[in-house]
Image: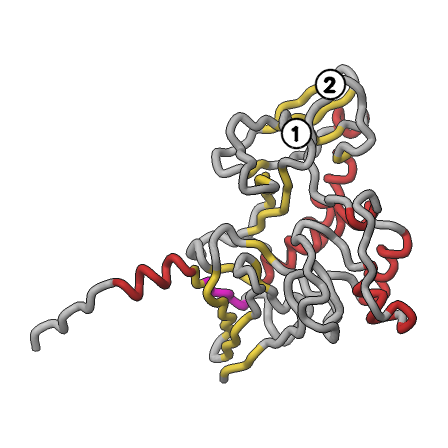
Amino acid sequence: MNDKIRHSAIGADYFPSHTTPGALSMHFSRFSLFATLAACLLPAMAQEQPVPPGDAVNREMQQIVDVQSTRDPDLRPYRTMLRGLDAYADHLRLAPAAPLRFMLLPATPAARLDGVTLHLSADNLSIPIPLAPDGSFILARDKTAYDANADLVSNKKRASLRWRPDIHTPGLPDNVRRLGDLRLECEIRWAVEQDQLSFVTRNLFKLAGGPCHSSLIHVPFPVARALVAVQATSGERAAQIRVTDDHLRYVPPLHDQSWSDDTLLTLTYASDARVAGAAPATAAPPQ
C-alpha cells in the first residue's frame, strides 16, 4: 500500500492546512501562527499581516543567551525548561526507550559552538551544564537552581544559539527517525514555549488542538543537510512525506493516529543521492 501525505503549504512552523503556498514563509525556529491560524479560525482575518520585529509573536522563541552582570528578564528560566522534563515524563509512552537530551544549535550559518559553555545562573549561583562535542546536553532536576529561580544561559551573544529536544530511540540508523520520537519532541517544545506566546496566540493554538495534535497545524523538523525525500513506512504501508522548499525541513504526520508511533521515517539526503548516482556499476558475480 502506498499513500501520499499531502500538505497544502510548507515553510512555516505551524500553519492552517487550507492556506495557499507561499503566503506563510517563516523561520522554523519561531512559534508564529497568529495571523495564519487566525485566518483559518477567524474569517475576518483572512489575510496575513506583517508582524513588527519587536512584537512578542515574532520574537525568537529558542534563545539561550549570554551571561550578563545583571539579571536579564529575557533569559530562559530554569523553571520553564523543567516543563520540558515534565512533558517528557507525561508522554514517555510515545518513545519509551528513548532518553531525554537537548541539543544546542547555531542560530545562523556563521555561528559556531566552539567554546560554548552552559550554566544555570542566579544571584550567587553558577552551576555548569556539561556540553557534549555534538552540542547535546542533559538538564537534570536541581532543587538549588529551582529555589534560586535560575536561568539557563550561555557565554555567547544573544540569539546566536538555539535549543531543541533531542529524542532518539536507540538502534536506528542516523538517517531514520521514529514518529513517536518526533511526537515526543513536539510535546516537549510546546510545554516549554507555549507560555511565551501572547494570550491570544496561545489560545488560538489550543483552540486548533495544539501543534502536536491538530490537522490544521503542520510542524516542520529541521535537518543539517539538504533533503531529497522522506519516506514513512509502517508494515506494508508507505508514504512520501512533504519536504519544504528549502529542502532543510520535513513535515511528519504528528496528528495522524493512523500512523503508529513505531512508524519509521527514512531521510534521503541530496549528498548521499549524488554519491549513490555516481557510484560505478558493480559487475554481477559469476554464476
> Helix, strand or loop at disc 2?
strand
**Where 272 falls versus 229 (above or below)?**
above
In the image: residue 7, left or right of residue 15: left
- The quadrant of the picture occupied by the C terminus is bottom left
Residue hosting label 1: 157
Q: Quadrant of residue 45?
A: bottom right
Q: Quadrant of residue 280?
A: bottom left
The picture places residue 187, in percent across and down from the top left corner, at 70, 55
Identify which amino acid the numbered label 2 is placed on.
Leu
Marks 1/2: CA–CA distance: 21 Å
Residue 213 appears in the figure: no
Residue 162 appears in the figure: yes
Q: Which residues are magenta?
A: 263-267
Dot 1 crowding, Cα within 10 Å, few <14, some 14–19, many 20+:
few
In the image: residue 104, left or right of residue 278: right
**Where 3 falls versus 81 (above or below)?**
below
The picture places residue 85, in percent across and down from the top left corner, at 70, 44
Q: Residue furthest left?
A: 286
Q: Tag on residue 125?
A: 2
Q: Residue furthest top?
A: 124
| Colouring method of the image | secondary structure
Dot 2 crowding, Cα within 10 Å, few <14, some 14–19, many 20+:
few
Q: Is residue 135 magenta?
A: no
Identify which amino acid the numbered label 1 is placed on.
Lys
In the image: residue 92, left or right of residue 45: left
The picture places residue 129, in percent across and down from the top left corner, at 61, 28
> Helix, strand or loop at disc 1?
loop
Q: Main secondary structure of the magenta part?
A: strand
Q: Tag on residue 276?
A: none
Q: Residue at x 60, y 57 (%)?
A: 221
Query: Is residue 130 or residue 53 the one in the foreground?
Result: 53
